[in-house]
Amino acid sequence: MSRYSFITQKIKDGSHVYMPYVLLGYPDLETSYEVAKTLIENGAHGLELGFPFRDPVADGPVIEKAGNIALNNGFTVDAGFQLVARIRALSADVPLTLMLYYNMVLARGVDKFFADCKAAGIDGVLIPDMPPERADTVAPAAHANGIELVFIAAPTSTPERLQKIAAVAGGFVYVVTRMGTTGAVENYSDKLSALFASIKSHIDLPAIAGFGISTPDQARKMIGFGADGVITGSKIVDMTTNNMAEIAPHTKEMVGL
Amino acid sequence: MTATLKNDDFGFFGEYGGTYSPEALMPILDELLAAFRAAEADPDFMQEYLSILANWGGRPTPLYYAGNLSRAYGADLYFKREDLMHGGAHKTNNAIGQVLLAKRMGKTRVIAETGAGQHGVATAMACAKLSMECVIYMGAVDVARQAPNVERMKLLGAEVIAVQSGGKTLKDAINDALRDWIATCETTSYVMGTVAGPHPFPTMVRKFQEVIGREARAQCLAQIGRLPDYALACVGGGSNAMGLFSGFMDDKDVQLIGVEPGGHGLDTDKHGAVLCKGVTAVLHGMKTLGLQDKDGQIFETHSISAGLDYPLIGPEHAYLRDTGRASYVAATDDEAVEALQIFTRAEGIIPALESSHAISYALKLAREQQGKIILVNLSGRGDKDLAHIQAYLAEKA
């Protein structure tokens, strides 16, 4: 049984899930391990584990800067998989979703990459620059290794696109709740209820809100719009940089929503 | 629509090309593709595009026989004078086409990336003419080494954003322009400067640059009475080369050669010769070739010319390399500067540093292939490079 059933069951029981994002290797391997450990020990229902990339076009400036620091401090994909295995050893139940860019999958070789995922204890992989149209290039290798492919839905995703996503998606749907990472940020909040309703009518997976969420208030709003749970990313990086002691109470608060 | 190459409407050239973009961009790419296909099939649109190129842009550009160099090197050297295009480079062909399309789509704002500043200038000119708001992303390193073009863009009313991330060159400017577009795509069009990026950009930019090859082929027949033996162009992202090559794609006796930035040499890590040294990569929305490490982290490239300083390549070039229809070589920084000096003094034309890479290889080829006809795309003029060349020569002296 997939570890994602752990979150699916929680949602069925009427609660919401908190699945924070940890950028592996930031600022160094050991610190990011400690961050993951703190999140799990304080009740996070799942983790997104990011492999740093020099050109993260789907991420904002906080993740990009942190990724460059991680790479300058020597992060490699080999070291990343070793770290994932150590994080898996902390919990047998928590679903671990690896987030990384397509080029890193390609560079390792698709078959080897997904075999490494399985060996390290990964449950799903989210490739933000791989639209569902291109999923056929990795799906056989992913499924051969029991790895789910997780996809993003955006405020601009049409019903036709949600159907394409539904055909290949597993685990959960990562719902981008605002467009863009820099510059003028459009306010989509008036459309979010409709967005979550549309996603749920097309895709039978938990809809987890991410992007631009950092506070419990914002998380509560997303749940109000229909999200089954939330992800925080840049917020964890910020706390890692500025005050690691905040991570435990933040996690407890988010888990309790 | 274009029958010359295998290109279904997923935008693949063999295994290269396609669309590898964040979900947030996918609907807008679909919208752009539909708008482009409708526009290119609309005679009124294409007529307006060609009319602006003629009476505002100065087309057709001449085909120039370089008599002094031809006598000195023993082959017939012809140059397609894109340096005489309004704005000083071939980039205007594409910018006017895409800004016209943006207007047709009802967009009010245009963003673009630029390396040497030529595409930024061309886009700023087109936006001024067509009354569109214009924002140009440019790496901070390029802002410093292409100061005259930055001033031109500002004078034309564009906002220039100096990108501080990564190596602060073209790759980073594209990253930030794509991020802007994700946030603003409802009102904004992204005008890509080269035959790269997600579908439909490689196909669309080629379409708007095909005028180079179409004119050059007709001019060769009219002025020489035959087609050239070789057609050469410099290759950064690959738009001026695709423009020239497209005119001769079906003429199998015309050898197509792209000249890449060899930087300090292909045996160093300071070059941008993607077709000579790259491996399969996915970035900036396309599958193509790239210069990267074993984990897939894209390298920062080096070239004396900002316009060639890009670690990826337009996917159609990767396809042409694999199929053998075109071949690709490199010229180093030193060779390009030497060619620029030779060409300037022999012909009284200051070429862009980018184009000087193609000139360098053309001179080498002329020595080896006596009596042949060599056509070179003189993609831009070199005025923008004067300060950079002076500094380079002073350092060498």
Image (tube, rainbow, N blue to C red):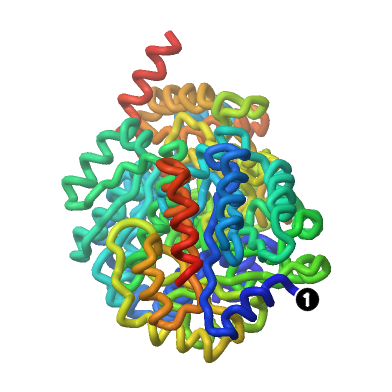
Q: Is residue B215 visible?
A: no
Pointer 1 residue: A1
From this view, report whether residue B272 is shown above or below residue B320. above
Classify residue B24 as left or right of residue B348: right
From this view, report whether residue A76 is shown above or below residue B34. above
Q: Nearer the viewer, residue B304 or A145?
A: A145
From this view, report whether residue A220 is shown above or below residue B352. below
Q: Nearer the viewer, residue B209 or A90?
A: A90
At numbered mark 1, what does the secondary structure look like: helix, strand or loop? Answer: loop
Percent x, y for residue B169?
Answer: 42, 39
Farthest residue, direction top: B397
Quadrant housing residue B42: bottom left
From this view, report whether residue B124 is shown above or below residue B22. above
Residue at image location 50% in from the left, 32% down from the top: B303
Classify residue A114 as left or right of residue B181: right
Residue at image location 37% in from the left, 36% down from the top: B142
| Label 1 crowd (10 A; few <14 / some 14-19 / many >=20) | few
Quadrant housing residue B140: top left
Quadrant showing the C terminus of chain B = top left
